[in-house]
Image (spheres, grey):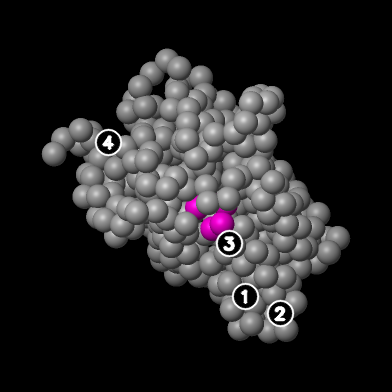
Amino acid sequence: MSESYAQPSGDVKRQQLSRFVLITCISLISFFPINILLPSFPALAARFDTPTAEIALSISLFTLVFSISQLIAGPLSDKWGRKEVLLGCITLSIIGAIGCALAPDYLTFLLFRSVQAMGCGFFVLGHALVEDLFEEEDRARVRLYYMTLSGSFVALSPLIGSWLQTTFDWQGSFYGFALMALGMLIHASCILASKSASPHRAQVSVIGTLKAVASNRDFLRYWWIAALVFACYFALISVTPLIFMDTLKLSEYQYALVLMVYGVAYLLGGVAASYLQKRISLARQINIGLGLLSVSGVLLALIIHYEAITTISLLIPMLISALAVTLVRPAAISAAMLLFSSSAGTAASAGNSIMFITAAVSSAALAQTGGHLLMTIALSFIGLSLWGLLTNSRIGRR
């Protein structure tokens, strides 16, 4: 464990639990800006007199700004300290969320949405804190556990979003985010030491570390694999309101139930990944997940070709893709972070930026495909999974 996080003797289990709670909360709150907001798309479109497709594009805007912010937050946390950067970012994200809820027009909403995205750069610090707060032999397990717990939130987030929409209108998800972020701010201020980056890190050039990260081919390959599967997940989840509510005419509650089933599959994927991690190599686990993603794309293409599009038929490839993502992402990210554990903030920000920029660009492109949306997603699943398999086969080579 990092010496900078050493604490006086006490209840070790309670200390570890408190740290795990913080990391888990960082993972869970990351679903508020996107997943929990999804059921509110029609209400947002009505409130700002804007087509639902443009509201979907605001997700891509959020992701692009977020990608830039985490590229800044990670290196700064290595240089100035995790606690200082974490608390500053959380505060900025709260301001942005409240601004979104109070926005009088769509332009103002987008402005504060960008402020929220800048603050949400703290999401990337979850990976860095795993490296700092836990021993090397525990990190992969901790990362897998909190990603599995995040699967539970994927399952519940549509229902939470639907409840917030029904009870508080579209502003509910933003007030909910602000409240949870405030709780995290208080918790982090209590358990993290000030100037929590180790003293020798402050002397390390951020640019120099970024160059080292960018020149490590295996690091880039692992994160590229994570980016490919996340792009598939993100592209699909960001257009589900268009598919299920606009095209298949599901109600907000029915749509929430569909995403809840998808989230359960995400959770089960985490359980499967936990089982496989103890029995097979990370490389093989990645290959299994990528194979499942390809199968999901083939099934989706067949459903479209034979015009068998229903809620149930679409759920089958969606569930397989959820399992695939939860098998691949934790394995690829853990392998990548192990290569730069001494500069975890910079490494995590660089990797996450690759992942989210890829997701933002792909989802924005998909939103423009119109009537060919589902087939484009199917072909993307197949193509990106094959690309991932090729990339994984090259790891370890110069």
Looking at this view, is 92 or 41 the one in front?
92
> What span is in magenta?
81-85
The quadrant of the image that shows the C terminus is top left
Whether residue 37 is visible to the viewer of this picture, yes or no, is yes
Q: Residues within 10 Å of mark 3 (few under 14, many from 20)?
A: many
The type of residue carrying mark 2 is Ala
The residue identified by callout 3 is 89
Mark sitting earlier along the chain (2/3): 3
The CA distance from mark 1 to mark 4 is 39 Å
Mark sitting earlier along the chain (2/1): 2
Say whether marks 1 and 3 touch (CB < 8 Å). Answer: no
- The residue under the point 66% across, 55% down is 32
Task: Work out whether 289 lies above or below 94.
Answer: above
Viewed as shown, does residue 159 lie left or right of 309? right
The CA distance from mark 3 to mark 4 is 34 Å
Looking at this view, is 180 or 330 the one in front?
180
Say whether marks 2 and 3 touch (CB < 8 Å). Answer: no
The residue identified by callout 2 is 103
Viewed as shown, does residue 40 lie left or right of 315? right
The CA distance from mark 2 to mark 1 is 8 Å
| x and y percentages locating residue 303 in the rendered image | 48, 45
| x and y percentages locating residue 378 in the rendered image | 42, 49
Looking at this view, is 277 or 252 the one in front?
277
Viewed as shown, does residue 202 lie left or right of 83? left
The residue identified by callout 4 is 392
Residue reaching furthest right?
A: 167
Which element carries disc 4, helix, strand or loop? helix
Mark 2 or mark 3, which is nearer to you? 3
The residue identified by callout 1 is 112
Quadrant of the rendered image containing residue 245:
bottom right
Q: Residues within 10 Å of mark 1 (few under 14, many from 20)?
A: many
